């Protein structure tokens, strides 16, 4: 009775709402309680819910108005809660939602609203008269696909990152223009070339995650901490070409050469996030110059690098995509990584780097709070 479901669905299995409830009703071992359908509709009423169910445990039974959803996005579950609460109040019973997956955070949100919830993975919170059940920790076996599977990683994540730089945009066009470097508020030296359709899909995905909301004033960041959490957990740096070696030039001469190539349009270069941490005052003592460039061959020639780890004082990482250069800060004749990129790299490092990353995260949140 305490085992999580063993039958493994195919990855990214698509479910209809009627299938979600059917799977639950024919699989009583999902949770340590019995769920049975009483009626598909509340007969004789104009209440629109997905049915009435009885949940029984150790001789006690509670009746619930059930709202079923085939998706597990936070926004979808929030809507299900509202609908279940409304139906339950009209019928004089308790509200419950059933979805493919409920994570720990969503279980806590349900409990705080006094709404019960059951998923198809073995997680639940059941609040009844005389008994309560909480079960969590089962992995998500029903991951959903999106047109944009990961709005928090890769070049398309510039739209999510933009809300940490400016928490409200009047329109999608304004958001896209910001990523292109056309904003009067913060011109960007290196802009994104992504299309309006991508911006729309990313914003929809962020709405599903309850990170942004559309308001009469535009598109507004409402959960900055959740955005940071998703950026950190889903951050991926793809394998790239790199080299380590020794350059004869001082840091000042090195940047003079790089900036000349940058201004000529021959090459982009930016300090890595780790190398930029000192600029933001959160980490010092990074001995080796570490750069991201979009042409490692040209950069190596310009800086006359002799490859090898003996007495190495420079590292080059090639990345031709736009993301590493997005929101770079040109100051003191040097191109520093965005504070967001710096924070992400620090968060992937060791204890010392992670502690520095926490300091930078506080700076980001503090600035957002003052907006």
Image (cartoon, rainbow, N blue to C red):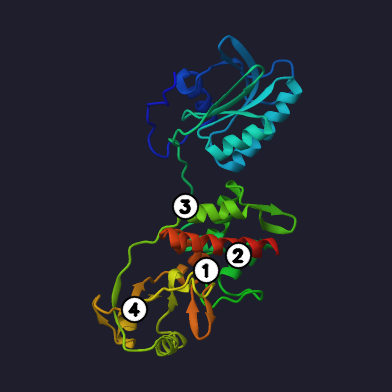
Residue 114's place in the image compared with 57, above or below, is below
Q: State the image coordinates of residue 147 (x, y, percent, origin top left).
A: 48, 50
Decide which of 130, 174 is in the foreground and name it.
130
- Identify the mark at residue 363; answer none if there is no mark: 2
Q: Pointer 2: residues within 10 angstroms few (<14), some, or many (20+)?
A: some
Which of pointers 1 and 3 lies earlier in the amino acid sequence? Answer: 3
Give neighbour class at mark 3: few <14, some 14-19, many 20+ (Cα, 10 Å).
few
Q: Is residue 230 visible?
A: yes
Dot 4, how many residues are within 10 Å of its Cα: few (below 14), some (14-19), or many (20+)? Answer: many
Label 1 to label 3: alpha-carbon separation:
21 Å
Q: Which residue is drawn at 33% across and 87% down?
A: 302
| Tags 1 and 2 touching, CB below 8 Å | yes
Residue bearing mark 1: 282
In this rendering, the label closer to the viewer, 1 or 2: 1
User: Residue 233: which disc?
Assistant: 3
Q: Distance between the residues labelled 2 and 3?
A: 19 Å
Q: Mark 4 points at which residue?
A: 314
Q: Quadrant of the C terminus?
A: bottom right
Kindly report the distance in space between the C-alpha atoms of the residues bearing marks 3 and 4.
29 Å
Closer mark to the observer between disc 1 and disc 3: 1
Q: Which callout, 1 or 2, points at the residue further toward the start of the chain?
A: 1
The disc, 4 or 2, on the residue closer to the chain's N-terminal end is: 4
Q: Closer to the N terminus: mark 1 or mark 4?
A: 1
Percent of width and height locating residue 149: 46, 50
**Would you identify the image quadrant in which residue 196 lies?**
bottom right
Spatial separation of the CA atoms under disc 1 and disc 4 = 21 Å
Disc nearest the viewer among 3 and 4: 4
Q: Work out whether mark 2 precedes mark 3 in sequence or the reverse, and give the earlier one.
A: 3
**Is the Cβ of the residue at disc 1 closer than 8 Å to that at disc 4?**
no
Vertical side of 185 occupied by 119: above or below: above
How many residues crowd around disc 1 within 10 Å: few (fewer than 14), some, or many (20 or more)? some
């Amino acid at each position: 009775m305490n085992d999580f479901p063993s039958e493994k669905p195919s990855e990214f299995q698509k479910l209809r709402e009627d299938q979600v409830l059917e799977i639950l009703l024919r699989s009583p071992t999902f949770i340590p309680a019995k769920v049975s359908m009483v009626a598909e509709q509340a007969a004789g009423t104009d209440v629109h819910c997905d049915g009435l169910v009885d949940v029984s445990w150790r001789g006690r039974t509670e009746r619930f108005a059930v709202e079923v959803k085939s998706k597990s996005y936070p926004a979808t579950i929030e809507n299900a809660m509202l609908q279940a609460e409304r139906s339950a109040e009209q019928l004089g019973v308790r509200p419950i939602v059933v979805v493919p997956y409920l994570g720990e955070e969503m279980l806590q949100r349900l409990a705080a609203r006094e709404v019960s919830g059951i998923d198809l993975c073995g997680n639940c919170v059941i609040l009844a008269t005389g008994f309560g059940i909480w079960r969590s920790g089962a992995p998500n076996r029903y991951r959903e696909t999106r047109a944009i599977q990961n709005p928090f990683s890769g070049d398309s994540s510039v739209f999510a990152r933009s809300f940490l730089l400016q928490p409200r945009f009047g329109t999608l066009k304004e958001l896209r223009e910001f990523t292109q470097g056309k904003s009067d508020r913060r011109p960007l030296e290196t802009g994104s070339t992504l299309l309006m359709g991508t911006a729309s899909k990313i914003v929809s995905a962020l709405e599903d995650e309850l990170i942004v909301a559309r308001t009469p004033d535009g598109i507004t960041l409402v959960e900055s901490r959740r955005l940071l959490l998703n950026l950190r957990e889903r951050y991926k740096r793809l394998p790239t070409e790199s080299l380590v070696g020794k350059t004869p030039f001082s840091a000042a001469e090195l940047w003079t050469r790089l900036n000349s190539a940058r201004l000529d349009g021959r090459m982009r270069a930016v300090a890595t996030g780790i190398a930029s941490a000192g600029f933001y005052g959160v980490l010092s003592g990074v001995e080796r110059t570490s750069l991201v460039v979009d042409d490692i061959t040209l950069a190596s020639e310009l800086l006359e690098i002799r490859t090898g780890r003996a007495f190495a004082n420079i590292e080059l990482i090639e990345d031709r995509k736009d993301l590493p250069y997005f929101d770079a800060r040109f100051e003191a004749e040097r191109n520093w990584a965005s504070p967001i990129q710096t924070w992400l790299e620090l968060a992937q490092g060791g204890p010392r780097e992670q502690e520095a990353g926490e300091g930078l995260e506080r700076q980001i949140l503090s600035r957002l709070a003052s907006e």
